[in-house]
């Protein structure tokens, strides 16, 4: 039997990238500035994380002119949403099953004599 942790996606498992995907999973798209403030990242850290996620096809980045400035919008891709949801399911499975080694007769926490 293979431990569920082997199903975790290392790219998504980074706390920064996980936080970004979690934020994007619940909205159609988010402005770069809003996202940076929400996940409490510097512009450069957010940019690096978004580049990694974009290169993997997990997010889509769109730039649009807004007066003299360029506004950057980010959305989670369908592939990214599927990968994020699978990652969360795997984390939930790990939390449910625990990390104990199989024993002949494990006693659930709180039921020991």
Image (cartoon, helix red, strand yellow):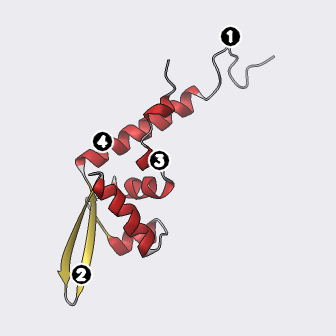
Rounded to the nearest angstrom, the CA distance separating label 3 from label 2 is 30 Å
Earlier sequence position, callout 1 versus callout 2: 2
Tell me the SS state at disc 1: loop
- Which residue bears the numbered disc 1? 105
Q: Residue at x 68, y 10 (%)?
A: 105
Earlier sequence position, callout 4 versus callout 3: 3
- Judging depth in this view, the residue of 30 and 4 nearest the camera is 4
List the single residue furthest toward the bottom.
68
| Number of residues whose C-alpha sits closer than 10 Å to that of mark 1, classed few (under 14), some (14–19) or many (20 or more) | few
| Left or right placement of residue 23 versus residue 3 in this view | left
The picture places residue 77, in percent across and down from the top left corner, at 25, 52
Closer mark to the observer between disc 4 and disc 3 = 3
The picture places residue 18, in percent across and down from the top left corner, at 44, 52
Q: Residue at x 49, y 69 (%)?
A: 40
| Number of residues whose C-alpha sits closer than 10 Å to that of mark 2, classed few (under 14), some (14–19) or many (20 or more) | few
Tell me the SS state at disc 4: helix
Rounded to the nearest angstrom, the CA distance separating label 2 from label 4 is 29 Å
Tell me the SS state at disc 3: helix
- Which residue bears the numbered disc 3? 13
Earlier sequence position, callout 1 versus callout 4: 4
The dot on residue 82 is 4
| Left or right placement of residue 63 versus residue 96 in this view | left
Earlier sequence position, callout 2 versus callout 4: 2
The dot on residue 70 is 2
Rounded to the nearest angstrom, the CA distance separating label 1 from label 2 is 62 Å
Tell me the SS state at disc 2: strand
- Judging depth in this view, the residue of 104 and 108 nearest the camera is 104
Earlier sequence position, callout 1 versus callout 3: 3
Q: Are marks 4 and 3 in contact (CB under 8 Å)?
A: no
Earlier sequence position, callout 3 versus callout 2: 3
Rounded to the nearest angstrom, the CA distance separating label 4 from label 3 is 14 Å
């Amino acid at each position: 039997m293979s431990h569920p942790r082997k199903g975790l996606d290392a790219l998504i498992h980074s706390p920064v990238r996980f936080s970004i995907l979690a934020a994007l999973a619940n909205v159609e798209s988010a402005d770069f500035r809003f996202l940076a403030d929400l996940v409490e990242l510097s512009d450069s850290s957010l940019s690096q994380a978004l580049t990694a996620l974009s290169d993997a096809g997990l997010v889509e980045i769109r730039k649009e002119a807004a007066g003299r400035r360029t506004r950057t919008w980010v959305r989670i891709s369908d592939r990214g949403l599927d990968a994020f949801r699978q990652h969360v399911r795997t984390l939930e499975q790990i939390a449910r099953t625990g990390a104990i080694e199989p024993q002949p007769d494990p006693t659930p926490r709180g039921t020991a004599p």
